[in-house]
Amino acid sequence: MGMNCKPKCWAIVPLVILGIGALGWVVMALWNWLIPTLFVGGRDIDYMQALGVLLLSKILFGGLRGHGFHGRWHRNRLEQMTQEEREKFQTGMRSCCGSKNKQEASCSTEAHTD
């Protein structure tokens, strides 16, 4: 996100932070419920360790590039759009968070097509 993002684009930042926090709590609760009872010597973990396990599992199993199911779904959806729908979508995204006005967005669209 650039410095020129509209306020509505910044509204998603607290939701992402809240989602990561909630997911960390879920990992911690599940770990502390399952691991000590399933494995001899398994210990409880705290919240920061749960976030570390979450990050480690993302690195090991999901990679850092985001090419999982969600990325494939978006790519397939973009491929099914007509050229006009794709350009309208890209211009809308750039005007939201990518550039200060629609003239800059259209200039950057033209630059990418060359």
Image: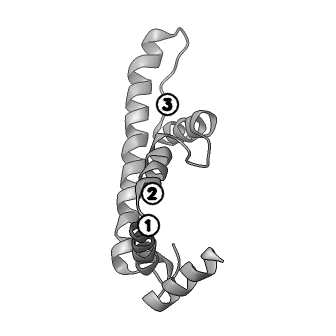
Residue 101 visible in the shown view: no
Of the two numbered discs 1 and 2 on the same chain, state the one appearing first in sequence. Answer: 2
Q: The disc labelled 2 sits on which kind of residue?
A: Leu
Q: Residue at x 35, y 59 (%)?
A: 15
**Marks 3 and 1: in contact by CB < 8 Å?**
no
Above or below — where is 82 with respect to 70? below
Of the two numbered discs 2 and 3 on the same chain, state the one appearing first in sequence. Answer: 3
Where does label 2 land, which residue? 78
Q: Residue at x 50, y 85 (%)?
A: 106
Secondary structure, mark 1, is helix
Q: Give x and y (percent) for residue 108.
A: 57, 82
Tell me: 39 left or right of 13: right
Q: Give x and y (percent) for residue 66.
A: 55, 48
Q: Give x and y (percent) for residue 33.
A: 38, 21
**Marks 3 and 2: in contact by CB < 8 Å?**
no
- For label 3, the crowd category at 10 Å Cα-Cα, with few meaning under 14, some 14 to 19 and many 20 or more, is some
Q: The disc labelled 1 sits on which kind of residue?
A: Arg
**Marks 2 and 1: in contact by CB < 8 Å?**
yes
Residue 16 visible in the shown view: yes
Q: The disc labelled 3 sits on which kind of residue?
A: Ile
Q: Nearer the viewer, mark 1 or mark 3?
A: 1
Q: Give x and y (percent) for residue 82.
A: 41, 63
Where does label 1 land, which residue? 86
Q: Residue at x 47, y 88 (%)?
A: 100
Residue 65 or residue 54, whichever sits in front: 65
Which residue is outermost to the right?
114
Where does label 3 land, which residue? 45
Mark 1 vs mark 2, CA separation in Å: 7 Å
Of the two numbered discs 1 and 3 on the same chain, state the one appearing first in sequence. Answer: 3
Q: Residue at x 43, y 41 (%)?
A: 24
